[in-house]
Amino acid sequence: MSLAPPHRPFAIKALNLVGGGLGRLGLALPSLDEQSLLDAAIRRAGSSDFGGDDFLEGMRVLLDSVEREADLSTLGRVSCRETLLRYLENRLRLTEYRTQHPDVAEQAIERPLFIVGLPRTGTTLLFNLLAQDPDNRVPLSWEVEWPVPPPEPETYETDPRIKDAEKLFGNLDRLIPTLPAIHEFGAQLPQECVPINAHEFLSMQFHITFHVPSYQAWLNEQNMVRSYEFHRKFLQHLQSKYRKKRWALKSPAHLPAIDELLEVYPDALIIHTHRDPGYVMPSLASLHYAFRGMNSDSVNPARIGRNVMDAWSIHLQRAVEARRRHRDKPEQFFDAHFEDTLADPVDLLRRAYEHFGLELSDVARGRMSAFLAANPRGSRGVHRYAPEDFGLEIDDIRRRFAEYADEFGVALST
């Protein structure tokens, strides 16, 4: 199997061609200069208090890595600048709102339910099903992208920010036509925690969308407590006017930071998903290829394969070590294997709820079953990829992740 080149509509080809010419003349546009970004965010928000300046270190490492290593196209520069501006503007608006409404800091977050695990292990399916439980509050994409003011129940389905998010994700699907088959995005779909943590510039999101090995190496050395403290403030803000029994959250990015997650959320309930890494790594590489192909005209599939293997070797080893350290908390962890998720995801969640001492109501189960019936597997296209597309071999992958597979009894497909 051979990879199709990144999708390039004529207008994007023209934009990248013109921008590339200007870049060769020394005019890299739009600007990714730190001060330019900060000043633009301040103008947009009408405020200058970012809630502290600890985030600047990560932002500087990221910007340096992007400029030196990512080889961004003009579209990639536009995408990068607008994404960073949105996060910076959100920081300003969140800080201002919290200052004006100090009661937000008193919001309690009790027994949040986290799905963690390798990407492509059923995390999204389980997350979508958890969203069907009326007792669960999940962050939707539109409120993560534009969190201020906090959403209210009366307008949660009609908030004008939904249309802004529909435009944002609609453009993403047009630029990456293969994306819906890999991972569906939508304004009113549950959103994982990666973009929340990205506001603190401590997130693997940037490594997925851009070739930034220096930033990822720096990130691997960071303590993530500060990122989870921001995450907690973000959730407090979102629930300040619209709250339910518990938060249901999801991200593979939590895997290397289980210790830090539990430091900030000591009563967290964690569903840890598992699947044969031999199938996960090529699938994950294809996701990187799709996003990086939107932002650069020089993506290297074999390099992506190596990036994915190197990064997740570190992430999974840390997860294994963290789970060993927290063996005294069996009531807070539930292991979900991919085969069980595929066979009967509603029953798997029933067992998880029972393990955590939660009630899965008949209403919730009915809504979960209805969701499955309305969204059969593969209904948004077939995700096609092959290990050799990324210079990978299944047996080599399994050898590298053998300790993880042994630790959790992960079944290896033949």
Image (cartoon, helix red, strand yellow):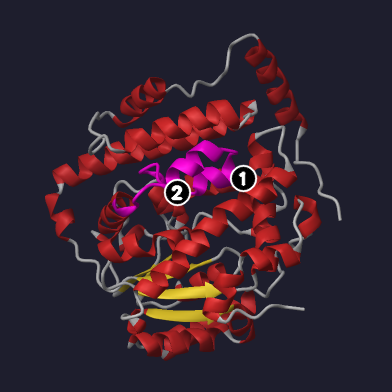
What residue did someone put label 1 on? 172
Percent position of residue 326, x then y: 34, 75
**Picture residue at 23% right of the left edge, 37% below the top:** 52
- Name which residue lies at 35% across and 77% down: 135
Q: Quadrant of residue 405?
A: bottom right
Residue 139 position, x and y percent, is 40, 60
Q: Residue furthest top?
A: 25
Tags 1 and 2 touching, CB below 8 Å: no
Residue 175: % across, % down: 68, 42
In the image, is residue 194 above or below residue 55? Answer: below
Q: Which mark is residue 220?
A: 2
Q: Nearer the viewer, residue 69 or 190?
A: 69
In the image, what residue type sits under mark 2?
A: Asn
- What residue appears at the point 30 percent right and 66 percent down from the top-left corner? 262
| 228 lies above or below 112 | above
The three-letter amino acid code for the residue at tag 1 is Leu
* Residue 263 seen in this snapshot: yes
For this rendering, which residue is in front, 351 or 92? 351
* Mark 1 to mark 2 CA distance (whole Å): 28 Å
Chain part drawn in magenta = 198-225
User: Residue 251 vs residue 292: left or right?
Assistant: left
From the viewer's perspective, is 377 left or right of 241?
right
Magenta stretch containing residue 13, yes or no?
A: no
| Residue furthest out toward the right | 1
Res. 160 visible in picture: no
Query: Mark 1 or 2 closer to N-term?
Result: 1
At mark 2, the secondary structure is helix
- Quadrant in the rendering for residue 86: top left
